[in-house]
Image (spheres, rainbow, N blue to C red):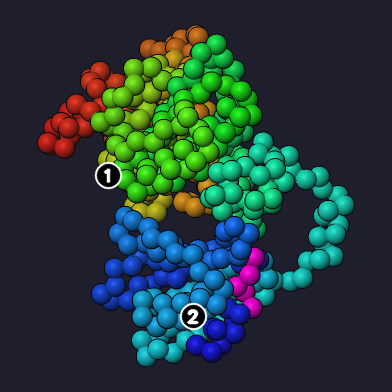
Amino acid sequence: MEELKAILEKYLNEELEMIILSGSRKGREEGKTRIRPVLLKGQLRFQAETFRGPKAFHENLTAEETKLRIPELLTEVYTQLQLTAGAGTVTALVSKKGKVTVKEKKKADKKADKKVSLEHNKKKAYLLEEGKPVPFLVDLGVMTPEGRVVHARYDKFRQINRFLEFVEDILPALPRDREVAILDFGCGKSYLTFAIYYYLRECQGLDVRIIGLDLKEDVIRKCAALSKKYGYEKLDFLQGDIAGYEGCTRVDMVVTLHACDTATDYALYKAIRWGAQVILSVPCCQHELNKQIENEALAPILKYGILKERIAALATDGLRAELLEQQGYETQLLEFIDMEHTPKNILIRAVKRRGAEKGKKEKAAAYERCAEALHADLTLERLLSAGRSPADSYRSRKKGDKS
């Protein structure tokens, strides 16, 4: 372990991006541990996030504590380490007999190139500006109290700003003469929920009320405490599921990020029933069509599991977009970068437009032909056809009624 300790001495600083410990030993309940640098009250700390089942546990350590903890984890819990930093990458493997193999790959010194880059490239203008501290970004470890973006969190900073660019595009569709109601289903840690509230209310001056909904009680409790701390009187967080939520009669915008599999369909259906002007959805885990998809002409391709999975995911979102078009939404499928889940995701952006429902019969016929060719029977289409409330349909499906 001495070689590993020397490596950690070198890399445990602000230039560290991430350390991932994985390969749990037999009998251990831990999934993986991620370690990243954070600034807490101006002090550099290393946050260890350990996953046990569906929950994540956090601990903030000093550099010295981290140097001791990592070898301990590799001895007792994990067998692999992957480190990425500005100066290079490191991998460490522990054999069954306890032998540690460390490989370091240093990055080339790009100081000369950096000088040229600074001279010839303009700094990107973000909607949330660098150098201007944003309270929730400071507390979430993305910014320092002075407004400087933490190096290891720059991907998250870019992701938040990219999402706000999508929001900026739909501003004309939101009312300005009354309170704007927004629902965020499956809000999770709520980086983007806070970002939407801050941008629309503080930067754009809109009267907005946002409700963040998630199943995890501890996440909701933490987000609610932060909202109260910032004085965000119209940003509320509630525990609950997408299908069963009946707390609103009118919603202007529905946001759903990484609602798993058919949970996205329930969220989209609710948005349609509410007549939401705007829908922003980043689906994930499209298992439903993956189980159904069949096509004789595509059989040579679909026999490969990874290709079948990707084709099913893309087809699912394409069919969802078509169903939204039939309901009078002008719909786009856009690339959304999200570093925490997958390298690339598709964002469905739908805006209610007058006249967008024209050609509904033709669109419905085209959808049917496509669905029939793929043997697709999507939850969203069934909900729209039946006209049932998502909660009732969800309860029926749990009892085994697939109609």
Label of residue 303 in the image: none
- Where disc 2 sits, the SS reads helix
Q: Which residue is mark 1?
A: 291
- Where disc 1 sits, the SS reads helix
Is residue 147 rendered to the left or right of residue 57? Answer: right
Q: Tag 2: Cα neighbours inside 10 Å, few (<14), some, or many (≥20)?
A: few
**Looking at the image, is 367 positioned above or below residue 188?**
above
- Look at the image and give the residue range highlighted in magenta: 10-14
Q: CA distance from mark 1 to mark 2?
A: 46 Å
Asked whether 187 or 314 is in front, the reply is: 187
Residue drawn at (67%, 36%) of the image: 127
- Quarter-of-image position of residue 288: top left
**Looking at the image, is 358 positioned above or below residue 122?**
above
Q: Which residue is mark 2?
A: 68
Of labels 1 and 2, the one closer to you = 2
Residue drawn at (54%, 49%) of the image: 139
Is residue 326 rendered to the left or right of residue 115? Answer: left
Q: Is residue 13 magenta?
A: yes
| Rendered location of residue 53, percent (x, y) | 30, 59
Give the residue type at disc 1.
Lys
**Looking at the image, is 178 positioned above or below residue 130?**
above
Is residue 330 rendered to the left or right of residue 148? Answer: left
